[in-house]
Amino acid sequence: MEAIFQALISGLAVGGAYALVALGFSITFTTTKTLNFSHGEFVSSGAFIGMSAMLLLLGKPITSTTFGGAVPGVSAQLLALVAALVVMGALGWLLYAVGVRPFAKQPGMAWVMSTLGFGVVLDSIGLAIWGPKPVVVPSPVGDSVIHLFGVGVRPQELILLAVAIFVMIVFDIVMRKTMVGKVMRAVAANGNVASLMGINTNAVMIGAFVVSSALAGLSGFLIAPITQASLFMGLAIGLKGFSGAMVGGLNNPRGCVIGGFALGVFESTVNLWQAQWREIAVFAVVILVLAFKPTGLFGSRLVEKV
Amino acid sequence: MKKYSHIAGVCAIAVVLGAAALSIGNDYYLHIAFMMCVYYLCAAGMNVLVGFAGQKSLGQAGLFGAGAYAVALLTSQTEINPWAAMAIATATSGVCGVLIALPSLRVKGPYLAMVTLAFGIVVERLVSDWTDVFGGAQGIYGIRSPEIGGQPMSLGQWVCVGLVFCAVTHLLLRNLLNGRFGRAFLSLQADEIASSSVGVRVYRGKVIAFVIAAVTCGLAGAMVAQQNQYINSDFISFQLSIFILLLVLFGGAGTKLGPVVGAIVLTLLDALLARWPSVQHTLYGLLLLFALYVMPGGVVGALSKLVGRESQDSKEEYATAGGHVTTLLRGGRANSAELLTVTKLSKAYGGVKPAQEISFALKRGHIHALIGPNGAGKSTMINMLTGVVRPDSGSIRFNGKEVGGSAVYFICCMGMGRTFQNLRLFADLSVLDNVMLGRHSRMKNGLFASLFATPKARHEEETTRRRARELLELVDLGHLASRPAGSLPYGLQRRAELARALATEPELLLLDEPAAGLNPQETAELGELLLRISKFGVSILMVEHHMDLVMSISDHVIVLDYGIKIAEGKPSDVQVNPRVVEAYLGVDEAEAA
């Protein structure tokens, strides 16, 4: 029983990271009908940029692979977070400018290749700077396990969960209650009509990529203290985030978030039982869901007019 | 003649290269040559999938791994003949190809790409984590290579074997892509709905393309494992999937030489940069990012644009058919039995009900018109008849058989051809290819007949080409046969689509607003053409707003309004029917009272 509760908590925490990634996919897909196929690399990059910022603030070279017991203070952590968000947002802009915009109108999903390529370049640059070794990143709230209802929980997991939920709620309110949200929904519904109404669709699309990439960075920054920062961690998180989005329905942000959390919990439950089948079980579930609901559990069907 | 000269050319090149390989003693060069063969195999199959069928697979490394590990386990654990192991491994990979294609039944586009990516990752994890079976990073030793004269094959001999495989693959795929299947792949890449409406089994086509890509990749994997006599999890990586994709995109997706160029150039590049892995990866990333931008057709596409070579078709003389139209010779209108019977057909989208218990019958050899104000449910009716939209209830009997809810391609094969309200031609294909695609469902050559270009397959191809030309003559487009369909003016595109629908050899032709966007002169010509087609014995049901056209050529008119049939009968009767007048023009309240 305790083991299951434990799995539930850590599943929700890692699910929070997936949900942030899933939300990022949903944002770009609804506004631009494209996805960032290198979203995973963005997650890793977010983790490493946050880490490097902290190392700089501690007066260490950014290429050092250990914190050597030094724990950055809260202000340093927050500065690092801001740095990660800003840099990732800028990278999102760059990605849109060089990898998405020139290809969005081309047939045959050329943007899949270009965003993949962007990720490969990013990955190689990361490898050149930081090398392939994983780095242990200290958590701002310490690594001592706290006990909650008789199960040990790492404080960082709670932070990840709390931040993820907070971001989702803010996003939901912005989308539903503000003009910005209305504009984004208008572009999502029909970009051409939106631009005829005087909406700067290009700016909205850039915004979508900036927000989406910043969310990926946030996810990487928050999960690094739990899993260690590694350039290879992003691919799995990105893929599972996307799986969560598919399960929930790419065109429904709330569905994506639910899908991300559900997948996280499912994964850690399977982990309890047979660790090596984790990935396969997760993807099996995704394929099963798609077989019955091709647009996800909460996605709306697109009807093509003939 | 041309056919054999190509085969001879390919064989000659293979023999020369093979002889060169056997005379070179340098293992480094031989290894590069071997990898070129391996990557060519991967690229050739992948080209069918990406370049022709238009499906993105980002998990080819998984299929490569399936072949490599199958041969590894077979030869290291059992006493099986290494050649047989290679064959079984290739087949295993083909089965995995079916697995990866299964989701394509339900999802497409980015969803499918992501599913294939996940497949590659799952295989990668499986071989690195499940160490009991696959050995993980330790790998599997003792893989047996095929033997020649009691010795495992030397690298030079491997290159020769590779060249043979490449030449055979090239020739087989060339046969396949030059005919019925190549066209079908291109059509489903362009427009799945139009593709199925001309009788292409879209899902089956995708599975075939996935399996072809899987088989060649699996063979490549098996060759690498057997040549190295060792395999470990490092061979199977996401980078490999990307590299295989890049081979095709860089060389030129959808061109027949693209994979050759891609394999040669990128393998050389790979070997030259092997010392600097990070430079290598950055370069691949940049190529992926910019190759499609700088040269959308890859190296081959860019070169052929530079040379400005005309396609062969334009030089080919087209035979005038002398007004003879084989396809359409039918019984004429003597037999006026009911061809299509619709009974109580209903469809609702939430509160909108475009069809409410509609019943009517169409007679063989007649021209029927379906009219009604906008939103009356006319297009929905055509879509239900052709299987694009599934009716909620009711029955559609065609030639005495129930077809309601059947697949689109099946209804096409039964003998219903259609055109679309908003033209759905395959814009990048030539007009002739569009029309030839129409006859897809009538061609009898299967996959293997096409692969080996059997006499039957060649005969079918010839017949189809001839009939397509006849139809193009009929609609007066013979001189534009080799032009891309998308480049034609609007009115001519309508005629091309009509020819394509006729090529399906329909008994019933469904036309969704055939005169939309035509000027009065063109509309009158269309009317005459439809009458001619009708004389050949083809029944017609058209949705149309041009009342003069409807009234002048149709034998029978059905009027819909808000999903309800409000009238039917002879054009002259319908014209004066008060309910029809009311639906079109409204009615004064005073009069109505």
Image (cartoon, coloured by chain):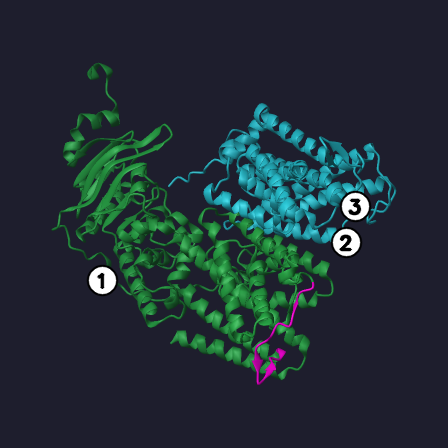
Chain colours: A cyan, B green
Which mark, by number, is residue B536? none
Count neighbours of disc 3 (C-alpha within 10 A) and say few if under 14, some if 14 to 19, many if 20 or more: some
Give the residue type at disc 2: Gly
Are tags 3 and 2 found on a single chain? Answer: yes
- Quarter of the image where one finds residue B330: bottom left
- Label 3 is found on which chain of the structure? A
Residue that mark 2 sits on: A131
Quadrant, the N terminus of chain A: top right
Segment tinted magenta in the rendering: B138-155
The residues tagged by marks 3 and 2 sit, at their Cα atoms, a distance apart of 14 Å
Residue at the image position 53 percent from the left and 58 percent from the top:
B297
Of mark 3 and mark 2, the one earlier in the sequence is 2
Badges 3 and 2: C-beta atoms under 8 Å apart? no
- Label 1 is found on which chain of the structure? B
Q: In this view, does B221 lie above or below A303?
A: below
Residue that mark 1 sits on: B322
Q: Is residue B126 above or below residue B153?
A: above
Tell me: A56 left or right of B89: right
Residue that mark 3 sits on: A136
